[in-house]
Amino acid sequence: MPPNNDLLETILMAGKYALSNLATLLVGGIVVALSFLVIGLPFFLGFVTRCMREIVRGNGVLPEWVEIGQMFVDGIRMTLVFLAYAAVYALIVLIPGIPVLVFSYTDMTFLLLISTILLVTTMAITAATLAFVFFASWVLYASTGSVRKAINIKKVIGFILYNPEGFLVAIASSAAIAAIGVVAMTLVVSIPWAVFTISVAITFIYARFYQDTAKLQPRMVEWLR
């Protein structure tokens, strides 16, 4: 298990980063709200990519909403990465989903219940696993600029295995940040800003994971090229 002091320090630093530029945070919530309508999604994904890139370079403050064109391009590319993960999720969930569909047309109530429980469990575990790995892919894209490397399972798993303990800290910290964010979402009007704050805080965590891994394993950067 990751040391408690590392975990707490990571959470506090991520929270500090997420609140480091209130003007950016205000605009970010609006962009997230537009993302629910798809319009703002490329800009949101592009901004998070910029955050990762700048954190890796040593910038510890939320950037401004500038260079919109490049942000949009990064957002479109990360949308492709997201769709790749969504396809994997759909394929995995499809397997336990078929029995649910079949049993729903029969009188086998018990088997329908069991298959439904299996489906829901698979959906939850798969979603959580892919979400954590997705951020690893995201920081790979931010650091290399390559969609191909971001969806290359060998590169993603290899990146994680260069520093598995650090990745555990990243997962635990991200889960804690997400849990805190869920509490903030109890006020419906705060949801866009809570989502933005959670996203950039987790972004900070994974970008720092990349930084720490690069320091511990200098050959990782060359391997990822």
Image (cartoon, rainbow, N blue to C red):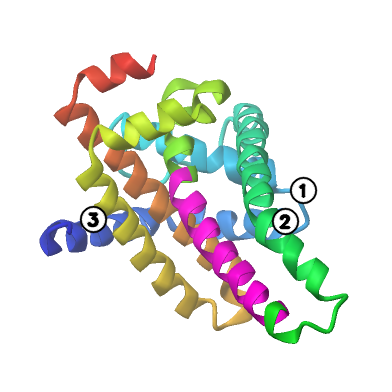
Asked if residue 112 shows in the view, the reply is yes
Where does the image place residue 224, in percent across and percent down from the top left? 37, 19
Report helix, strand or loop for mark 1: loop
Q: Which residue is mark 1?
A: 39
Q: Which residue is mark 2?
A: 34
Q: Which residue is mark 3?
A: 10
Residue nearest the observer in this picture, 20 or 46: 46
Q: Quadrant of residue 70?
A: top right
Under mark 1, the amino acid is: Ile
Earlier sequence position, callout 3 versus callout 1: 3
Where does the image place residue 86, in percent across and percent down from the top left? 65, 46
Label 2, residues with CA under 10 Å away: few <14, some 14-19, many ≥20:
some
Query: Could you give the CA–CA distance between mark 3 and mark 1, rounded to whole angstroms?
Result: 32 Å
Contact between marks 2 and 1 (CB within 8 A): the answer is yes
Report helix, strand or loop for mark 3: helix
Whether residue 115 sits left or right of residue 218 in the image: it is: right
Q: Which residues are magenta?
A: 112-133
Query: Could you give the CA–CA distance between mark 2 and mark 1, rounded to whole angstroms?
Result: 6 Å
Q: Using the image, determine if residue 8 lies above or below residue 183.
A: above
Report helix, strand or loop for mark 2: helix
Q: Residue at x 12, y 59 (%)?
A: 3
Whether residue 44 sits left or right of residue 223 in the image: it is: right
Q: Residue at x 51, y 50 (%)?
A: 130
Whether residue 95 sits left or right of residue 193 in the image: it is: right
Earlier sequence position, callout 2 versus callout 3: 3
Residue nearest the observer in this picture, 177 or 32: 177
Quarter that holds the C terminus: top left
Query: Could you give the CA–CA distance between mark 2 and mark 3, rounded to whole angstroms?
Result: 30 Å
